[in-house]
Amino acid sequence: MPGGSYSVKRRSERKQVEIPVIFVVGSEDVGHAAVTVDLSAEGMRLQSDGMLSQGQFVRLHLAASPNDFADAHVVWVGKTNSAGARQAGLEFLISPTKFVH
């Protein structure tokens, strides 16, 4: 969960990286712009103006390469900041090779 002062044991190393992505929630036809905050082999933290809810399934597309995608589910959603953006933690359903090098 974001903003905690406790240490969490992660399954894999997280790397701070900003990658523009587009996410589509469930079976919607509308894509929402976002940027990664950090990334690991198991998931990512996103920042976006788009609305996400815990438990949703999303498809993530690299903005620079829309044919590359990864499916994930939303594990947590943070509070909206003063600029109207919020962060969310996503867990990949299958580890994608295009997002994680």
Image (tube, rainbow, N blue to C red):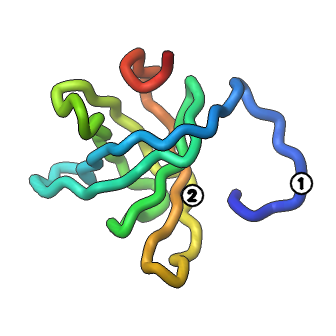
x, y (%) of residue 59?
A: 29, 40
Identify the residue shown where x is 52% and y is 84%. 82
Q: Amino acid at mark 1?
A: Tyr
Spatial separation of the CA atoms under disc 1 and disc 2: 16 Å
x, y (%) of residue 65?
A: 21, 29
Q: Amino acid at mark 2?
A: Trp
Residue sitting nearer the eye, 80 or 29: 80
Q: Which mark is residue 76?
A: 2
Question: Circle 2 sits in a helix, a strand or a loop, which is it?
Answer: strand
x, y (%) of residue 63?
A: 25, 40
Q: Quick check: 77 above or below 38? A: below
Q: Residue furthest left?
A: 29
- Which residue is label 1 attached to? 6
Relative side of 68 to 5, left or right: left
Relative side of 89 to 47, left or right: right
Residue sitting nearer the eye, 56 or 77: 77
Q: Earlier in the sequence, mark 1 or mark 2?
A: 1
Task: For label 1, count other residues whose C-alpha is less than 10 Å away and answer few (under 14), some (14-19) or many (20+).
Answer: few
